[in-house]
Amino acid sequence: MLLAKMLLDGSSTTNTTESNPFMAAAKPIITLINNATGPLLAVVVALGAIYAIFLGVKLAKAEEPQDKMKAKGQLKNAIIGFILIFVLILVLNVATGPLLDWVNTSAGTTIVTMPNASN
């Protein structure tokens, strides 16, 4: 239990008799997800913009009707793909809170918390 308290960095536990062996692994994973969503979202937006510009130039340069149709299809698929990635990142960010509540409830402790939850 002393090791678990050291891992918690001073977080209070409500039930120290029950221990969940996955809590030591859950805290770094949740922290990684919370810290990675902002930069990941910025990278997706930047790559999406660059790729859309590239495909737009390819569409503008296309002279044959088949090439124009192919470029339109690629541009449409790229936009759908990047929107899907954006939505999935947002869903992951929104689902983190309920997942943390579930982990904390099933363990009977309050080990993992959302960042800035005390603000």
Image: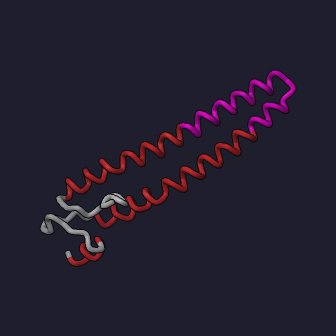
Residue pictured at 30% horizontal, 74% vertical = 9
Q: Furthest residue to the top? A: 65
The quadrant where residue 117 appears: bottom left
Residue 58: say if magenta.
Answer: yes
Position of residue 95 measured from the top left corner of the image (x, y, whole percent): 36, 46
Residue pictured at 80% horizontal, 23% vertical = 66
Left or right for 15, reference 110: left
The quadrant where residue 27 appears: bottom left
Left or right for 33, reference 55: left
Residue 74: say if magenta.
Answer: yes
Position of residue 116 measured from the top left corner of the image (x, y, whole percent): 36, 60
- Quadrant placement of the C terminus: bottom left
Chief secondary structure of the magenta portion: helix
Q: Is residue 90 above or below residue 106?
A: above
- Quadrant placement of the N terminus: bottom left
Colour treatment of the image = secondary structure
Left or right for 43, reference 61: left
Region in magenta? 55-83
Residue pictured at 74% horizontal, 37% vertical = 55
